[in-house]
Image: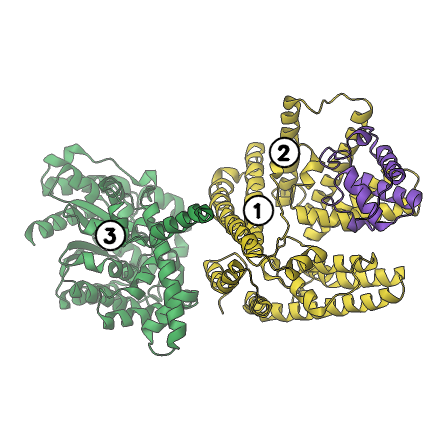
Chain colours: A green, B purple, C yellow
Amino acid sequence: MKWLRFGPMLLAVVIVCTLIFMPADLERAAISSNNMKEAAASLDPHVFQGMLMQQKMLKNEQYLPIYGSSELYRLDKYHPTNYFKVQPDGFTPFLIGRGGMYSLVHFLNFASTANQLKGKKIVFILSPEWFTKTGLDPLHFKPNFSREQAYNLVFSNSISPKLKQKAARRLVQFSFIRNDGTLGRLLEDVAYPGRRQPALRLADELKGQMTYKILTLHDLVDMHFIRPGYKKSQYQKPDRQLSKDNWNQLTLSAKKTAIHDTGSNRFHIDTSLYKKSIQHHLNTFRGYRKNESYAQSPEYSDFQLVLDLLKEEHVHALFISVPFNGRWYDYAGVPKQRREVCYKKIADEVRKNGFQLADFTRFDSKPFFLQDTMHIGPMGWVYIDRSIKTFFDRS
Amino acid sequence: MAEVTQDFKDKVLTILAEVCESDEIKKNPDLQLFDEGLLDSFATISLVVEFEQQLEISVPISDFNREEWATPNMIVNQLAERK
Amino acid sequence: MISFIPYASFQFFTLIAFLLAPIIILGLMGMRNTLYNDCVAILMTFLIFAAQPEQLISILLFIIWQAVLIKGYLAIRTKNNNSACFYIAIVLAIIPLFLVKLSADVPALNFIGFLGISYVSFKSIQMIMDIRDGLLKEIPLIQYFRFIVFFPTISSGPIDRYRRFREDTSKIPTSVEYRTLLYQGLNKIFLGFLYKYIIGYLIHKYWMGSPMLLPDTLSSIWLYMYGYSMYLFFDFAGYSNFAIGVSYLMGVRTPENFNKPFISRNIKDFWNRWHMTLSFWFRDYIYMRFVYTAVKKKWLKNRYLISDIGLTLNFLVMGFWHGFMLQYIIYGIYHATAFILFDKFERFNKKHPFWPKDNKWMHALSVVITFHVICFSFLIFSGRLDFLWQR
């Protein structure tokens, strides 16, 4: 038969279509538990800009996801990842977050895993630095924006239509999203429905579905090439010795480390960092944030989106509220009373929505909780480990 | 097909053999001239000029394409048609 | 507006699959609907350029300009064969292309030009030359339009010849012939996917894009050279396969552009295998015409010298055609030099044979040497060496 010659081409089309239109279940099945183990502490941005790995992880009882931002990268021996390795408590922390991942970024991520989040326990570390007058800006949003997750938001029905619309309205305020061709138009359709001709919308939806499937395929491939997102210098090995210590002993040894690392200056900032980037032009930092205030911020309503979603999915979430480095912010021109406004507003918002809060803002002016101007240090991690353990064991 | 006399054929082959600097052409009139490296762009032009001067047949060079003028026999026939 | 740059996006392939379906069905029945084909041509020209309205206007003006030129010159040529008229016509046909190439450096000219202007220019220039040679006696406007805006090859070739194209479009393939065309065409399109979007893409991303090749050291530039050469081939050969494949589906046997260029035995062989429609165009309309005129008018006694000048002219023009930039000019001079040196070598070898031809080891050695000579030319072409003469 002459027509048999067309066989290989047809086969190629079938293979490509199968790959592209592979159901998400199959794609998740193609991720092994080994890949997942590797991803848990990798902090590889592909993991949290994708969704397949997280969806699979959330279905696994063994993992406790910890959402946050740059502080997660301080992988010292007191960091939850390391601590719960030597003192197992029935879960493995799964780290999700990096610098610039404000509430809205987390919201998009949560939305893409909403089905799997149902009834799940999670930990969420908040940073007060997010709640500025501008809140999330394009500079921080762009590198953390995931087109795959945004497409998922457009096409998914797993969150309530009202919340979806609210989120879409917020997203299209960013011009880089609004102008993102098909995706931008589709999000605008969600935000302000009925503005466009149905035929045009349909064309964009078809194209969007296609792009979305290709993006998940990329996601799948990336999950097989997980690489650490942190630097070697940020990582310490787990310390077996710690397994014998009780909380008081742990706090003491962590404090000792902190004194050693940060004792050189009055701000209690890590000595090497201080010497490298602060000491020589300390004067330029005096009052450099004096116009900053935390009373009004778009971040509060972005954070509310997160809370709304977690409520809808009945997620058991522990929020961890971390302080500013009080001494440094005093110097930078943000007085304590302005900082307190921020702490209080965050705490109120969490509690009003019925979630648990581990509030460490009492360490605002006490040293050693942080290791620099904003990142959690060894002693901070010990306190946080303790509250995570309590949270996990109790609820 | 145009009539090809033996005299005409000999003349053409002599010109070809001269330009290509090869006598094999006369022995094998179905030789692939371009593939064998006997003719190239430069030799083609000499050939066209010689045809014009010796046979008084002018061939526009863009008409001299390598598929239709590939062997001595084909060249003879092409020229015969243009006589 | 959605952009439909040829063979660059999924939507382009979806669109042409949709538009070509009727042509394929009719083709398999041994039929062709010329009206439908013309409508597709008009629609595609519009869609390819619609995303940039100024390009659409440019191409429309361009087509009219060339049509007037060709028709006008044809009218003059039928009355008398005046050289001056011919040269004026050629110059007028080149002007738009020249201005566009210049516009890279002259911002005031930026508004003109469109994707593929050089390829379309080549088509009309060869028509004028064929008119001059008396090979074209009549050119129906509709045929001219079909040839010029043949959408499968409009953006980057291959460059077809009018007389060849005319035969394909005036003859409707039988059902059996079309089945072969369909098979070959689809095969080429799939080969295009393999070349451009799998092999080319991977080379570009993982070889050329490797951070190891960033420093200006000999070894990384050397490795980049191989990567770039492979990429250039697979990307462009892939594109050409798309263009030729789609042409076949429309019943037009657009000529091949590549014939395993990296196994060339020498530089001459290479130019018969690499970007063939362009190099043949240059060979026929620049080198050969120049040499022919010079030999006939006896400008110089030494024919070899004439040939060398012709080669230099040929490759220099090709260099400038790529763009008015130093890297392209050097690329042109480099190839002219290589070509001339090889000519001398070949002549010498004919008189005093020392390099045996029918030895397979010598053949392999020739291929390896030629391969490196061309890869190095692509390295110049790529601009990777620009740091040597900039600053």
Which element is circle 1 on?
helix
Q: Amino acid at mark 2?
A: Phe
Which element is circle 2 on?
helix
The residue under the point 31% across, 59% down is A149
Residue C220 sits in quarter:
top right
Taking the image as shown, residue A156 lies to the left or right of residue C64, namely left
Residue C150 sits in quarter:
bottom right
Query: Going from the N terminus, do you reach mark 1 or mark 2 first?
Result: 1
- Residue on which disc 3 sits: A25
Q: CA distance from mark 1 to mark 3?
A: 38 Å
- Residue at far left of view: A394
- Residue on which disc 2 sits: C371
Subunit of label 2: C
Q: Residue A99 placed where, x, y %?
A: 33, 53
Q: Residue C315 placed where, x, y %?
A: 74, 45
The residue under the point 77% across, 30% down is C346
The residue under the point 30% across, 65% down is A155
Q: Amino acid at mark 1?
A: Ala
Q: Is residue C105 visible?
A: no
Taking the image as shown, residue A384 lies to the left or right of residue C258, namely left
Q: Amino acid at mark 3?
A: Asp
**Count of residue discs:** 3
Q: Nearer the viewer, residue B9 or A297?
A: B9
Which element is circle 3 on?
helix
Q: CA distance from mark 3 to mark 2?
A: 48 Å
Quadrant location of the C terminus of chain C in the rendered image: top right
- Residue on which disc 1 sits: C237
